[in-house]
Amino acid sequence: MRKIKLLNKISTIVLTWILLAETSPFLGQENIKWDIFISQSHQDEAIKVALKDLQEAGRKYGLIFTIQNGNKILSQNSIIVGSPDRNELTAKFINNHNIMLQEIEDPQGYEIFTRLIDGRKIITVSGGSIIGDIYGLYWLWDRIRVFKEIPEINVKRNPVLKTRISLPWGRRSSAGETKEQMQQALRYSFNWISGPAILDLVPWDSEPERTNNKKNRERIKKLIDYAHKLHLKYYSFVNEFTYHPSLLEEFGASLTAEDPKFWEALQEKHRRLFRAIPELDGIEMCNDDISGFWENYRGFDLMHEGENCEWRYDKRLQTFVKKVHDVVVVEFNKTYFHFTWSLVTYEQGSETNIFRRIFTEEVPVKNLYLIPKITTADRWWHQPYNPTFNLTPHNTIVGFENMNYYEGSNSNIFPTIAGQYYQAGLQTILRHKSNNVKDAGYLVGSQRDSWDTRSVYSYVLFRLSWNPNEDIKQIAEDFCSIHFGRMAVKKMAEIYLLTPVAYKYGLHIEPV
């Protein structure tokens, strides 16, 4: 009964504050003018998108941004974009005012500093590269949305988790189906996004799949081109082993790991993929829950099935990874992401001994990223953290999943945030003396800007991927300021941070 009262109380407060926030206009200032100075090196699509976002966000709060390419006179409040070697105005400004820039070691990193000069506010955004400039502009964009003005910013930021990948599942892409999705991914600082599933891209020797997939590849090549313009890498996902029957017929292969022709067919599947669409930067796959197939395609659970096959589970999976690596990485020099998750807790997804037996020194490390999920088993509450991190020398991505699947994709029903759970797990993993986790993958990548569960998860993970030790309360308050306004910040953040308690103890039964 107390749990029900807690849920009702939170829901009532949430609804009240939402109504207040959605009916109360933000109090902006009146037309404060700013110049943004860019250089020739900033003739870049991602820079254009970031500047457009800045201008649109600024207009809501009375900030008028004018882009300056030629005029080098700081006659009013100004933002100078680029390091001294990419923007001569930056070099001139820091020399004239004896400013010492810190060294930016990471190309993705940036430094932002603010100076008050003759009553004018001058802000410099200096990245370790063009992408660093872009991320710096988006931090400024984030600060405007949080504070409803441009606060004084003096910060140096480098991402702790360098690769940030938006994870798909089944046939569903993740952030790579439209230009709008890619732009949203850039705002959250993703640098890998996924498009259509591999089954929908391979040139199969059958109809209508051959014709349909040719159209898919023509479409995806345009998407990949735009992704690259935004400094995003593009990959495709598959549940393995999924196939079209024509592939096995062509090779005379049987569905068993002991058949050499089976492995030939597996490799040829990926070989044909990259021959047909060499623009693709890599692939991701998962060998569990073989549900990612449709229409005339078929699925085969290599780990557990196979007539009269005496190969052990670990040998099957190790062989699979090596065979795929030989094609994807060795032959085509692409990136191979392998999602190690499984539905059960007694296999490689969360069993340390099995994980070690599979990913031995025989499995190459080049361009191979393993992706254990942060939870021991599936997405459910009352889960201990996954123990398979930091067991082998392979590059490792920590996978995060939306832990609220009660809220539909187009609804805002009791949004929840597991930021504290995520943060504590991430800090634990990164403290390991043999830490090899340098990257993050999100099964919660948001494709819209809202206050729903997916959006708050994406925002929290965006912040934690840059700084795993950032105050989670501050992150929640920033998110609530963006979506509910400054007046509602404290109460709304308190509610969001309380929601996992309601979910964990209100909807799930705690283990004995």
Image (tube, helix red, strand yellow):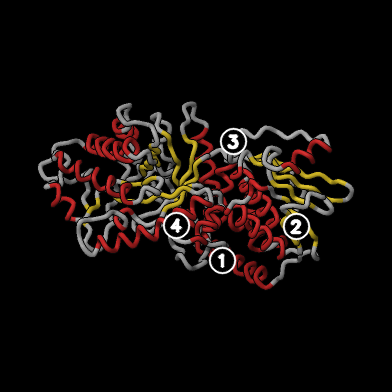
Mark 1 Cα shell of 10 Å, populated few (<14), some (14-19), many (≥20)? some
Q: Is residue 104 visible?
A: yes
Closer to the chain start, of discs 2 and 4, is 2
- Label 1 sits on residue: 11
Q: Which mark is residue 106?
A: 3
The reply to whether discs 4 and 3 touch (Cβ–Cβ < 8 Å) is no
Closer to the chain start, of discs 4 and 1, is 1
Callout 4, which amino acid?
A: Leu
The reply to whether discs 1 and 3 touch (Cβ–Cβ < 8 Å) is no
Q: Nearer the viewer, residue 72 or 462?
A: 72
Q: Quadrant of residue 336?
A: top left
Q: CA distance from mark 4 to mark 1?
A: 40 Å
The reply to whether discs 2 and 1 touch (Cβ–Cβ < 8 Å) is no
Q: Nearer the viewer, residue 293 or 276?
A: 276
Closer to the chain start, of discs 4 and 3, is 3
Residue 477 position (above or below residue 315): below
- Label 4 sits on residue: 223
Mark 4 Cα shell of 10 Å, populated few (<14), some (14-19), many (≥20)? some
Q: Nearer the viewer, mark 2 or mark 3?
A: 3
Q: Nearer the viewer, mark 4 or mark 1?
A: 4
